[in-house]
Image (cartoon, helix red, strand yellow):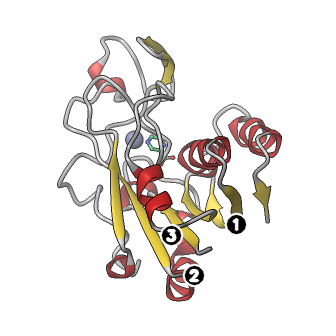
Amino acid sequence: MPKALLVIDLQNDFCPGGALAVPGGDEIVAGVNELLAEHDVKVLTQDWHPAGHGSFASSHNGKSPFETTEMAYGTQVLWPDHCVQGSNGAAFHSDLNSDAGDLVIRKGFRPEIDSYSAFFENDRETPTGLEGYLRTRGVDKLLLVGLATDFCVAYSAIDGARLGFDVTVDTKLCRAIDLEGSLDAMTKQMTDAGVTLI
Ligand code: VGL
Ligand code: ZN
């Protein structure tokens, strides 16, 4: 059965100079391009928020980025405005061979709900459609790379494992935000979910 490569959110706003820059985010691009050349099934995710999105601190009176708020679906970290639909920040890193992707999954487009995972929005039940795509292409194994290790990569990996895929995260081709111990916490959650970290 084919293995799919999932490239998570390798976008300008998550790279140095971007609105929500992940340290070293751009360092993984060359290695990700090599993996794109080696896989049969290649999916890219793209964080894709409307202006005024509910995950933006600027949408909440008196809140600053990296504080939290309670949303209908639970606690949400508030972010600087990032990956606004159609903006340069939302575009893939210009050196990423995004043309090699078979499918681009956009996520986080509903104003009232964030979506870290490639499979489900942050209520953990609204699907993105990716599961059906992968299953109908006969995929049972996933290799995940991208940004950020402790948010969108981890949520995608855990959901993938929960859905029964055999999931590996290549940590050399990921970089983390690491907010208040989030990298350690999410690493443990991935391991507990049965995700293989290499
Ligand atoms: C992400 C925070 C907000 C990510 C996306 O790609 O990890 N993190 N939106
Ligand atoms: Zn986002």
Mark 3 is surrounded, within 10 Å at the Cα level, by few (under 14), some (14 to 19) or many (20 or more) other residues, namely many
What number is the disc on residue 170? 1
42 relative to 150 in the view: left or right: left
Residue 46: image location, x then y, percent: 36, 55
For the residue marked with disc 3, what is the amino acid?
Asp
What number is the disc on residue 26? 3
Report the Cα–Cα distance between label 3 and label 1: 15 Å
The answer to which quarter of the image holds residue 107 is top left
What SS does tag 3 mark?
helix
For the residue marked with disc 2, what is the amino acid?
Leu
33 over 108 or under it: above or below: below
Would you name the residue on which mark 2 appears? 35
The reply to whether dot 3 and dot 1 touch (C-beta < 8 Å) is: no
The reply to whether dot 1 and dot 2 touch (C-beta < 8 Å) is: yes
Residue 197 visible? The answer is: yes
What SS does tag 2 mark?
helix
Label 1 CB sits under 8 Å from any ligand 1 atom: no
Residue shown at 63%/36% (left/top)?
179
The answer to which quarter of the image holds residue 43 is bottom left
Indicate which label's residue lies in the foreground, 3 or 1: 1
Q: Which quadrant does the N terminus fall into? A: bottom right
Label 3 CB sits under 8 Å from any ligand 1 atom: no
Mark 2 is surrounded, within 10 Å at the Cα level, by few (under 14), some (14 to 19) or many (20 or more) other residues, namely some
Report the Cα–Cα distance between label 1 and label 2: 11 Å
